[in-house]
Amino acid sequence: FPSAGYVEPGQGIGPWLAHITLPAVALSLDAVADVARQLRSSLVAAYRENYVTGALVRGLSPRRIFFTHVLRNGLGPALATLGLKFPSLVGASVVTEWIFGLQGFGRFANDSAQSGDVPAVQGVLVVSIVLVVAFNLVVNLVLARVTPASQRGV
């Protein structure tokens, strides 16, 4: 894998993937580890609930129990963790783009801040805030759709 630079997707999908793989792995490794840890712990806790025992007693298949009961109840905390990690991904893009020599949103923010370009920095902040709010809105909508507790009447 090349350690720096960027190739447009129009120049070939292979070279583009080779140039973007290391930055993507470096940027997402922390978030993936936290989400996986949260998902595992919530799935273990969901398997210990009484409704899983009841489903086993009724004779449901392990696959159906996992997808219908356990995963739906265990997915909520993992999605919430993903929503909390998104702002750090936006902030870490500055460092990742600098290390791998990429031109992007983080590099633009860094260059604008260092040159004292106040309108550009304000624009970066507004776009970052909109991205974080929009991503959290999507996460909350998915949580409301997926988790069974949110679908029950009060």
Image: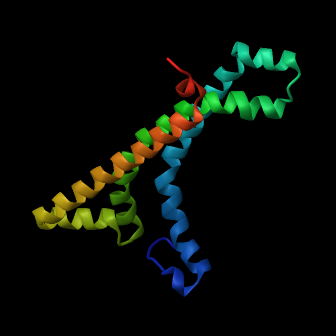
- Disc count in the image? 0
Residue 66 lies left or right of residue 74; in this view the side is right
Is 128 drawn above or below residue 32 in the view shown? Answer: below
Is 112 drawn above or below residue 48 in the view shown? Answer: below
Name which residue lies at 17% across and 65% down: 120
Is 126 drawn above or below residue 76 in the view shown? Answer: below
Name which residue lies at 55% across and 32% down: 76
Residue 69 lies left or right of residue 98; in this view the side is right
Name which residue lies at 44% across and 76% down: 5
Name which residue lies at 64% across and 32% down: 72
Where does the N terminus fall, quadrant-wise?
A: bottom right
> Residue lying farthest front?
153
Can residue 1 be seen from the camera position used here?
no
Q: Position of residue 94 (x, y in %)?
A: 33, 59
Residue 37 lies left or right of residue 30; in this view the side is right
Q: Position of residue 84 (x, y in %)?
A: 41, 39
| Display coloring | rainbow
Q: Position of residue 109 (x, y in %)?
A: 25, 62
For the residue pair 6 and 57, the one nearer the viewer reads as 57
Can residue 47 be seen from the camera position used here?
yes
Q: Position of residue 91 (x, y in %)?
A: 33, 52
> Residue lying farthest bottom?
11
